[in-house]
Amino acid sequence: MSSLVRVCATVLLFYACGLYGSHMTTKAADACAQALRALERKMLKRFDKLEDGVSKCCRPPPKETYASCREIYLSHNFHKSAGNKAYSLKTRGGKIPVYCHMTRNGIGKCGGGGWTLVMKIDGHKQTFHYDSSYWTKKISFNPQGGATGFDHRQTKLPTYWSTPFSKICLAMKLGTEMRSFVAHMRANSLHSLIADGKYRKTSNGRDTWKSLIGRRASLQEHCNREGFNVMSDSGPGSSKARIGILSNNENNCWSCDSRIGFGTGSPKWRFLNSNTCGNSHGYDAKVQIKTMGYILVQ
Ligand SMILES: [Ca+2]
């Protein structure tokens, strides 16, 4: 807008001085030019003020804090430019850097839209075994690990008990290959789905769960009970998963000896019990695949 005013004022100046210039004395012409320049400066000041006023009233004020990566994604054209990195989020555990997956191509089959990291689990480690109190308590684990993406650093962030969502991105990485899918579930937080220990069903299907592992995935034929806080009917000694699917060789859910999931365990079978994220099949450990697991919400 300022440049338009400058052009108009200059044209006016030239016009006035051109029209009357030949009839003016040099002194009068200089005075005319000075007066017009002063007018130009005044007009520019006025328009600058007007421009400031317009931008203050029409642009949404930048928010100081965002509660989720989705909120950041929606508030800007982030899908066009912003990277996948840590953003400062306001959580019930304070304002902390949280890894956000923001790019349009998204996380494999989960797609894009702004994903907030909640947990990263190493299936070789016992930190997030089914029986760990990290699943029930509002405490974080290695929050520094939550500022980075799909690496081998374990973490549990305050987003576990702070971030509401309508879908969860479940991803597993084996070697360098990562596979994922979306589980549709609405909740106030992941804590509200898991901490009370109640079983909550999902309906993704055994093939979808197997797709997290790839061609080596193995589940028995029967039961196929899936969701949150999944347990065999024979009790907590058999296979169980905080998020996952259990299958059985018998046509019931009594003694499930295979599973794919996050936060798994089976205290009755020591060897299988050591796998806390990935795929196990058979108490003789026919299949024992430990993965890195990633849980993000949106
Ligand atoms: Ca069985």
Image (spheres, grey):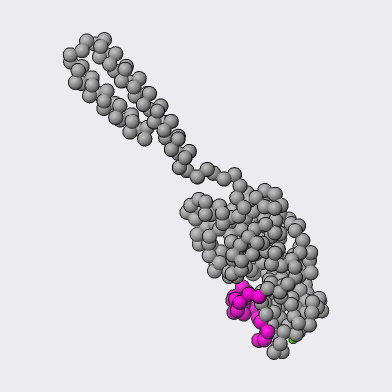
* Any part of residue 20 in sight: yes
Residue 217 part of the magenta segment = yes
Image position of 13 (left or right of 265): left
Vertical position of residue 218 compared to residue 21: above or below: below
- Pick the front one: 41 or 126: 41
Q: Position of residue 87 (x, y in %)?
A: 61, 50
Direction front: furthest residue: 57
Residue drawn at (25%, 11%) of the image? 28
Vertical position of residue 192 compared to residue 219: above or below: above
* Any part of residue 126 in sight: no
Q: Quadrant of the C terminus?
A: bottom right
Which region of the structure is painted magenta?
Answer: 201-224
Vertical position of residue 92 compared to residue 213: above or below: above
Q: Quadrant of the N terminus?
A: top left
Disc tally is: 0
Q: Position of residue 259 (x, y in %)?
A: 70, 78
Residue drawn at (35%, 32%) of the image? 3
Q: Position of residue 169 (x, y in %)?
A: 60, 66
Residue 37 part of the magenta segment = no
Q: Position of residue 194 (x, y in %)?
A: 71, 67
Residue drawn at (31%, 17%) of the image? 35
Vertical position of residue 276 compared to residue 87: above or below: below
Q: Quadrant of residue 64?
A: top right
Ligand 1: quadrant of the figure? bottom right
